Amino acid sequence: MLTSGLPTAERERELKELAYVLFVGGTDTSATVLVSFVAAMVTNPEAQVKAQAEIDSVLGYATRLPTTSDEAQLPYVRNLILEVLRWQPVGPTGGPPHVCYEDDVYQGYDIQKGTILIGNAWAMSRNKNVYKNPEDFEPDRFLDPSVPHLPAFGWGRRKCPGIHFAEASLFLAVSSMLTTFTFSRKKDIDGKEIIPTIEGAFNNLTM
């Protein structure tokens, strides 16, 4: 362990700071994904109905909350989460920047060694050659094994170290919310549903 040679007090402080960073690093991003999930359910009620039907078929109606052991039996819920991550990428710039370790050429562009590279996850999520109708929310697109998952947690050795914890947390949060709530649209004074407009917002880590 990197802190093993430190004095006890300093080692404990370093470990506390590390634990804090690991925890806080996922709060902002996870909260943003859940906001996008709710927006997706309000704008795509048919997806919500399908996910809730799948959950009820596995858990029974109002019997218990989902656990991670249920995930394998809830493929549509899993695909719904993948689609939320693609539809509204939590990190549009693809996570930490990378550095090119040797001279390279990409589509006619010379990339010199030492160049800082930032992935455009938003552009990837809107690639029509990869995702048909990219602006639409379609969880079933991932039924096709040839459709790749958007690298929402970055890529390479510098991708999010909390990816497995985040995926499990998102599954529990999303499936539990679908089990206990139904998200619906507001209505105007005439009783007609208001179709919401989804717009991006900026904060310190996410969009």
Image (cartoon, grey):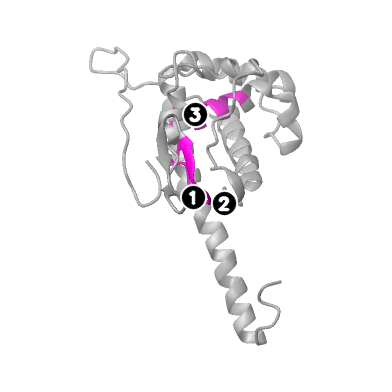
Q: Is residue 54 left or right of residue 21?
A: right
- First along the sequence among labels 3 and 2: 3
**Would you identify the image quadrant in which residue 135 lies?**
top left
In the rendered view, tell whether residue 154 sits above or below residue 146: below
Does the image show residue 86?
A: yes
For disc 2, the marked residue is: 158
Viewer-proximal residue among 180 and 44:
44
In this rendering, the label closer to the viewer, 1 or 3: 1
**Residue linked to disc 3:** 86
Residues drawn in magenta: 79-105
Q: What is the crowding at mark 2: few (fewer than 14 residues within 10 Å), some, or many (at least 20)? A: few
80 and 126: which is toward the camera: 126
Q: How many marks?
A: 3
Q: Amino acid at mark 2?
A: Arg
How many neighbours does mark 1 have within 10 angstroms: few (below 14), some (14-19), or many (20 or more)? some
Tag 1: residue type?
His
Q: Which numbered disc, 2 or 1, marks the residue that appears first in the sequence?
A: 1
**Above/below status of 88 relative to 166:** above
Q: Is residue 85 magenta?
A: yes
Which residue: 46% across, 34% down? 106
Alpha carbons under labels 3 and 2: distance apart: 20 Å
Q: Give the answer, above or below, for where 103 lies relative to 152.
A: below
Which residue does the numbered mark 1 point to in the structure image?
A: 98
| Residue drawn where x is 57% and y is 33% of the image | 174
Please give the label number shown on residue 195.
none
Which element is circle 2 on? Answer: helix
Q: Are the two marked residues, 2 and 1, in contact with CB atoms closer than 8 angstroms?
A: yes
Is 176 one of the magenta-colored residues?
A: no
